[in-house]
Amino acid sequence: MRRYELKATMMTSNRPLEEWGKLIGDVPAATAILDRFLHHAEIINITGKSYRLQNRQTKTTGDDEKNGKTKKTQEACKGTKK
């Protein structure tokens, strides 16, 4: 069965497209891979601080540590509860 142009595919990367040649170690191969990925693609560039890294840098306490929650995470969630 053919998937091309029938299904959506989402791909994420924390590296800019310009660095893929170095990451893969073969610039022509990286160019070919990106050419196929980016054909009909919509690129969404998200900027800003990482929530994942921000939460890793804060301290966890007591029961929250067991649940993987931090004080900052709880404070952020308080504003979203209805």
Image (spheres, rainbow, N blue to C red):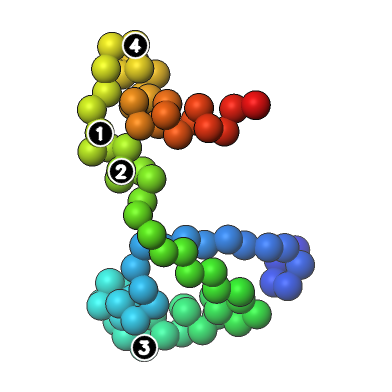
Which percent across, then down, holds residue 75?
42, 29
* Badge 4 amino acid: Asp
Picture quadrant of residue 23: bottom left
Looking at the rendered image, the quarter that the C terminus falls into is top right
Q: Quadrant of residue 52?
A: top left
Q: CA distance from mark 1 to mark 2?
A: 7 Å
Instruction: Mark 1 and mark 2 in contact? Answer it, CB < 8 Å.
Output: yes
Among the two numbered marks 3 and 1 on one chain, the one whose residue lies closer to the N terminus: 3
Res. 58 mark: 1
Q: Earlier in the sequence, mark 1 or mark 4?
A: 1
Looking at the rendered structure, the kind of residue marked 1 is Thr
Residue at which label 3 appears: 28
Residue occupied by mark 4: 63
Q: Which residue is mark 2?
A: 54
Q: Earlier in the sequence, mark 3 or mark 2?
A: 3
**In the image, 9: left or right of 78?**
right
CA–CA distance between discs 3 and 2?
36 Å
**Residue beneath the point at 70% across and 72% down:** 4
